[in-house]
Amino acid sequence: MKLRRTGVLLAALALVATGCRDSDDGGGGGGDGEISAPGVTEEACPDAVNEDNGCIYLGTISDLTQGPFAPLGVPITEAQEAFWARVNEEGGIGGYDINVTEYVRDNLYNPQTHKQVYGEIEGDVLALAQTLGSPTTLAILPDMERDEMVGAPASWTSLWAFEDAILESGTNYCVEGMNAVDYMVAEKDISSVMAVHYPGDYGGDGAAGAEIAAEANGIDFTGVETAPGQEEQAGAISAILDAKPDLVILGTAPTETAVIVGQTAAQGFTGQFIGLGPTWNPALLATPAAPALEALYMQSGYWGPYGSDTPGHEAMREALGEVEQPNDGYTAGWAWSYPLKAALEEWLAGDYDKDRAGLLEAVQSLETIDYEGMLPEEAGNRSGEPDDNIFRASVLSKVDKAAPSGVSLVQDFTVGPTAEEHTFEGACFEG
C-alpha cells in the first residue's frame, strides 16, 4: 500500500459541502450493494445512453482557458469525455452510466482556483476523472484525503506513487529524466547534461532524475530553473550557450520549448534537447522554431504517441472521430481513464463498502489494469509498496511533421540502468 505524505502538504480547508448528492444516492452502506456515496444516483444521467441505468458523476478540474497547459488540458478533457461515452455505449459499469460533463471546472493552472472549484463540486461527485497539474493537485490533496476522494491526475510527478488516492498512469518525470540521460549516454557517449526546468514537482522532478542519472554515469550535471513565459527565458538561453552541454533536458511548457530551442539554435547551439512529456505540442511545428526542433529535439513520453498501433490508440481515434489537430493531450486523457474504470468495476462488483472508502479500498486491491495495449497490464499494480509498483519504462520520439501529433516513436518502452537500480523512498523533487 502507498505511504501517505500529508505532513508535507498544505493545511486542509475547513469542511465544505459534503454528503450525498440527493435522496436517490441510497442509504445504508457496507458490502451489500447499497450505495451511500456522493455523486451516485439511481436516477439516469442527463441524456443517458442507458435509460435504465443509474448515474455516477465524476468531476473534472483542468486547465481550459488561460493557463500554460490549456493546449493540453482541452484535448485531455475531450478525450476523457469520449472514453466514458464509449463505456456508456458498451452498457456502462455495474448498472450505472458515467457522467463526466456535468461537473467540469477550469483551474486556470492556479492552486488557489483549483482548491476553490474542488470545494464547489466535491459533494456532487464520486471521484475525480481528472485533476490537472502537480502543484494544483497538491493544493487539494489534504482535502481529498479528508473526503476519501479518488482522483486520476493529469500529471506525472513521482509524488503520486506515495499517495493512496491518486490513480496515476505511466512512469514519472523523475524516471523520464533518468531514462533520457541513460539513452544519450548509450547512443552518443555524452559527457554533460543540463536540466532547464520549472521548479518543483514537475520540472524539478525531472531534473532530479537527470541529476541522479548523470551521477550514476559519471558525467557533469547543471540545473537551471526558469519561469513560465516567452520573455522569461533569457537566463536559460544564456546558460545553455555558455555551458554548451551535450544534452539539455527540458521541463517546461510548449511555449518555452519553442523559445529555448529556437533561440539557442539560432545562436549556434547544436546539442541535443529531450523534453519531458508536457513540453510538446504539434502546434510548435507552425512556429519559426520548427527547423530547430526537427534538427535538435526529441520527445520523451509515457506511452506511444497519437498515431501508435495499439487497440487502445485505435479505440481512442475511433471514439474521437475527426479532430482538427491531433494532439497527445488526447492520448494522455484516454490512457489516464483506464485505472478509474478498473477501480469502478472492482468496487461495484466486489465485496466493498459502497462508499468512497470502499472505492479507495478497491483501488488499493488492483494488481493489473487492461490499458488495451497502451501500457502493459502490470503498469496498473497498486497493491504493493511504491518502490515495487513504480512503472519505470518510458518511450522516446522524434519530431516528424508527417505524424499525426508531430512526433513518431524512436524507442519503445525501455528502462535504463539508472531507473532499474534506483530505490524510490519518496518524491525525487523533495530529495
Image (tube, rainbow, N blue to C red):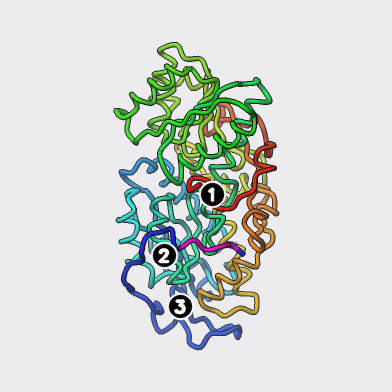
The reply to whether the magenta stretch includes residue 4 is yes
Q: CA distance from mark 3 to mark 1?
A: 39 Å
**Magenta residues (range):** 2-6
The residue lying at 35 percent from left, 27 percent from top is 233
Residue 348 position by quadrant: bottom right
Q: CA distance from mark 3 to mark 2?
A: 31 Å
Q: Position of residue 14 (x, y in %)?
A: 31, 71
Q: Position of residue 126 (x, y in %)?
A: 47, 70
What type is the residue that disc 1 sits on? Ser
Q: Secondary structure at mark 2?
A: helix
- Compared with 171, 61 (above or below) is below
Quadrant of the snapshot with the N terminus = bottom right
Q: Which residue is mark 1?
A: 158
Q: Which residue is mark 3?
A: 43
- Compared with 117, 96 (above or below) is below
Q: Which residue is mark 2?
A: 142
Between label 3 and label 2, give the one nearer the viewer. Answer: 2
Q: Secondary structure at mark 3?
A: loop
| Residue 201 appears anywhere in the view | yes
Farthest top residue? 268
